[in-house]
Each structure stands twice: as structure tokens, then as C-alpha cells.
Amino acid sequence: MVFWTGRQEQYRTTPLQLMWGLMYPWLIYEGASILVTAAYMVFRMMMDPSLLASMKDTDQYIRTMNSLINENYVLIAFFTCLIAIPLMLLFMHLDRKKEERMHMTRECWELPGVPAFALCLVCGAAVCVLFNHLLMYSGLYDLLSSSFEPVADLLYSGSLLMEIIAVGILTPVVEELIFRGLIYRRLRWALEAKWAAVVSALIFAVFHGNLLQGIYAFAIGLLLAFVCERYHHIMAPICIHVGANVISVLLSENTALQKIYESNTAFLVSTLVMMAVFVASFYLILTKIMPARLEPPASQNE
């Protein structure tokens, strides 16, 4: 059973209040990243005091620290997520309390079963490969990849297991809690679903910080908002996002899978296969995933 809140006619807020409500979860996540990075730098200097003594000037210090941070970016992301996830869950809980306090109209829906969320994992993996292949076919990947390459070097700098845990699972969880669990839901208090989806996808695109990822993030952000609204549950976009990120890690680190990019035939076949998988999974989401609307418990009607 899931409670879901849509557009509220009685919801009133100033543009500044709305903007702050959309910004601070993102800022707190960035703050957690800075905190973990600073703690890591202090830890390295405590473990190796000669490291600091060997740095002759500020420029060398900055270069050395940046190099150490880049080499351990995935580990830093792991601990950042461990800090950010409980904070975002707390904010979501406070939002639900605010909905109750303001007597917002909330609908009660059944919780989809495990196969429905497994379908999201498949859809996410397919849409990741398909969107990236379309960017390559369009020429945008070659044109804009220079802005993404430094990010890719950071994301895929750890062991495969740590990349799957931190980049493939934990990062999608924390991003979905922020962008669909908080930002999209708050936009839904004031906007219709389609406009909330567009605005949240734009914010999601800007968050990624480079044009190539931004294009991809905007497109998949629309899909994430759609499944969030379709399932009435945050686990749906989380599963889409996890499926996309895990397959991205595997394609980047597995030499056997990378062979599809060495042959035009393999590249075309893989694109067609992923297109078929995406179309099939999305069709099933459209036609089979229809949670029933339930009567809320008596305590919720009071």
C-alpha cells in the first residue's frame, strides 16, 4: 500500500521557497561529498606525514591532493552515499508529515509486485545502451565526449565490485531519492505531472555538469519521472536507474562486452536488440503495470 500526492490546489508557496525546496537536497548531497573528500585528505596526511612535508608549494599540494582524490573517487562516492541516503530518507519522511499536516489530498495505491520492479531493471539496462548508441549514431558522442571523458575516468577508476556497489547501485539510489523522491514530488504539489517531469529532468540534466551527460540525463529523467508516477513508488525509478548504471559499468569494464564496439555489425545488432528489449519492457509497463487505487485506512481519512 502506497500513499501518493499529486497537484494540490490549496498548496501555496513563494517562488523563492519553492526554489529553496528544490535546491537544498542537492546542496546537502554536494556538502556530504565535500565533507567525505576533506576527511579522506586528512586521513591520507595522518597516515603519511611525509606526504605533506614533500610538497614544496601550494600548486604542488593541490595537484597531489587532486591526484589522490581522483584515484579514490569511487571510494569517496561510496561513503558520500552512505551519509546522504539516510538524510534524504529523513527529508522524504518530513515531506510526508508535511502533507499530513497541511491536509493534502493523498491517494492510496496498491504496491506493485517484485516482477514489476524487475521489469524496471531490464528497461533501465536497455534504455542505457540504446540511448548511448543513439548518441553515437547521431555524432553527438564524438562531438561532446571531451567534456565527459574526465568524468568517465573518475567513475571507472575503482575495482569492478566497488564500481558496481558505489556507481551502479548506491549513486542511483541517492540520486533518485533527491530527484524523484524529493524534487519531483515537491514539484507535483504545485504542477501537473508532465510539467513536473520536464522541470525535474532539466534539473537532473544540469546536475550532471556536462552537455553529453546532460542530454542523456534529461531523456532518461523523463522516463524516471514517468515510472515514478506510473508505479506510485520511488523504487520504480531506482530500479530503472540501477539497471542503467550497472550495465554502464559492465560495458565500460568488461573487455568481452566492449567487443560490440569493435565491429559495425555487432554494434548494429546490439542496438536493435536493446531497442526491442526497451520497446517490449516499456510496452509491458504501459499495459500491465496498473496498480489498483485503494481506500485509505480510516485514520488517514480523519
Image (cartoon, grey):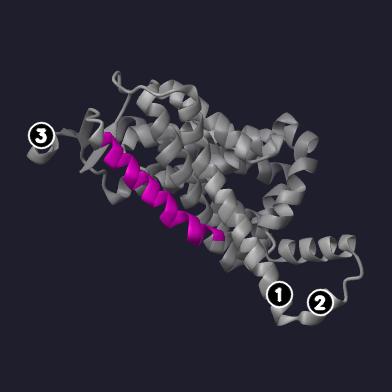
Residue furthest right in the image? 56
Estimate the spatial distance between the alpha carbons at disc 3 and disc 1, rounded to whole Å.
Answer: 56 Å
Answer whether labels 2 and 1 touch (C-beta < 8 Å).
yes
Residue placed at 29% from the left, 41% from the top? 96
The stretch in magenta equals 80-99
Residue at image mark 2: 51
190 is higher (above) or lower (below) than 90: above
Does dot 3 land on a helix, a strand or a loop?
Answer: loop
Q: Is residue 297 left or right of residue 169?
A: left
Does 86 lie within the magenta span? yes
Q: Is residue 236 left or right of residue 142?
A: left
Residue at image mark 3: 302
Task: Specify whether residue 229 is in view.
Answer: yes
Give x and y (percent) for residue 58: 87, 62
Residue 133 location, quadrant:
top right
Residue at image mark 1: 44
